[in-house]
Amino acid sequence: MPIIKKHIASGSTIYSDGYQLYQKTPRYGYRHDFVEHDQNEYSRGEVHTNSMEGFWGLLKRRLRNTGGVRRERLVWYVNEEVWRYNNLGSSEQEKIQRLIQLLKQFGGKKAT
C-alpha cells in the first residue's frame, strides 16, 4: 500500500485482478473494481488488466533480448519502455518532436 499511496492520487480508480492487497484500496480513498482471473474473467466493460499485462510482456521481451540488465539500471529501462508504450501510435516524427520538447524542459541537463 505505501507504493500505491505514494504514486496514485487518492480518489483515483484502480482496476486490478483479484489479488487480495488491492481489495484494501477503498479504505485509503480509492475507487476499485477488479476481474477474477481465477474465475476465467479477464474483462468486464472498462475493467481489465490487459494493458498492464501487455506492457509487462513487451518489457520482459525487450529485457530478454538484451540479455538482462543490472538492477541499478532497471529503472531506466522501465522508464524508456513506458515512454515507448505510451507513444506506440505516434509516427517517428511525432516521437522526435516529443523528445526535443522533453530535452528543452530539462535544459539539456542530465537527469539525476
Image (cartoon, rainbow, N blue to C red):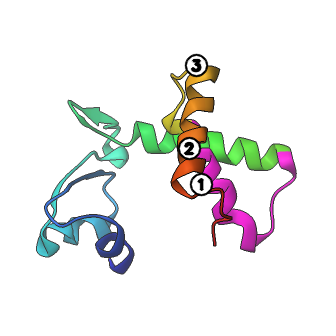
Q: Amino acid at mark 1?
A: Asn
- Say whether marks 1 and 2 touch (CB < 8 Å): yes
Q: Residue at x 64, y 64 (%)?
A: 75
Q: Is residue 68 magenta?
A: yes
Q: Residue at x 34, y 75 (%)?
A: 6
Q: Is residue 71 magenta?
A: yes
Quarter occupied by residue 45: top left
Q: CA distance from mark 3 to mark 2?
A: 14 Å
Counting residues from the start of the chain, the first of labels 3 and 2 encountered is 2
From which residue to which does the magenta span run? 66-84
**Residue in front for this viewpoint, 103 or 75:** 103
**Magenta stretch secondary structure, dominant:** helix
- Judging by the rendered image, the residue that carries numbered circle 3 is 91
- Say whether marks 3 and 2 touch (CB < 8 Å): no
Q: Amino acid at mark 3?
A: Ser
SS assignment at label 2: helix
Q: Amino acid at mark 2?
A: Trp
Q: Residue 20, labelled with which disc?
A: none
- Judging by the rendered image, the residue that carries numbered circle 1 is 79
- Horizontally, residue 20 falls left or right of residue 92, namely left
Q: Residue at x 80, y 68 (%)?
A: 70
Q: CA distance from mark 3 to mark 1?
A: 20 Å
- Say whether marks 3 and 1 touch (CB < 8 Å): no
- Judging by the rendered image, the residue that carries numbered circle 2 is 83
Q: Residue at x 29, y 47 (%)?
A: 36
Q: Quadrant of the N terminus?
A: bottom left
- Circle 1 Cα neighbour tier, 10 Å, few/some/many (<14 / 14–19 / ≥20): few
Measured from the top left, where is residue 86 in percent x and y?
A: 49, 37
